[in-house]
Image (cartoon, rainbow, N blue to C red):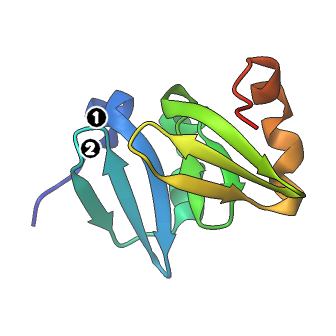
Amino acid sequence: MTYFDCSEDIMQIVYLEADVNYTIYHFFNGKKIILPTTLKRHEAKENLRHFLRVHRSFLLNPDYIIGMRKEGKKVSIQMVNGKEVLVSRRKKPIIKHLKKQQFLIA
């Protein structure tokens, strides 16, 4: 079993994705690591506190956000690796400060 220390690779994490009771770490180089813990536990880690929880299944690293797209009432965030993540209705206030940073694509 390989031990994963996220403090070493924290700057390389693009986003974390929930999959039932597992969490998938997606890295900038395309590598993925699956850990047998919930996303909620990872969200509570001190070194991941700056990540944004925009959906019940995603925790995003704001350093890798390249834009936002709004279609009607739906808002999605584009990540540097091409992943587009839908923002839940209740989490929209969290991303308002990103709009101020001119991420809005249209």
Secondary element at tag 1: helix
Give residue 90's position: percent from left, percent from top. Answer: 88, 59
Identified at 50% across, 69% down, the residue is: 18
How many residues crowd around disc 2 within 10 Å: few (fewer than 14), some, or many (20 or more)?
Answer: few
Closer-to-camera residue (94/76): 76
User: Horizontally, is 102 left or right of 23 in the view?
Assistant: right
Question: Is disc 1 in contact with disc 2, using a CB cutoff of under 8 Å?
Answer: yes
Residue type, mark 1 in image: Asp
Secondary element at tag 2: loop
Q: How far apart in space, not on screen, are marks 1 and 2 (Cα)?
A: 7 Å
User: Horizontally, is 7 left or right of 37 in the view?
Assistant: left
Give residue 70's position: percent from left, percent from top. Answer: 79, 47
Give residue 54's position: percent from left, percent from top. Answer: 70, 52
Closer-to-camera residue (95/33): 95
Comparing marks 1 and 2, which lies closer to the viewer?
1
Q: Is residue 23 above or below residue 64?
A: below
Give the number of the disc on residue 5.
2
Give residue 1's position: percent from left, percent from top. Answer: 9, 67
Q: Which residue is mark 1?
A: 9
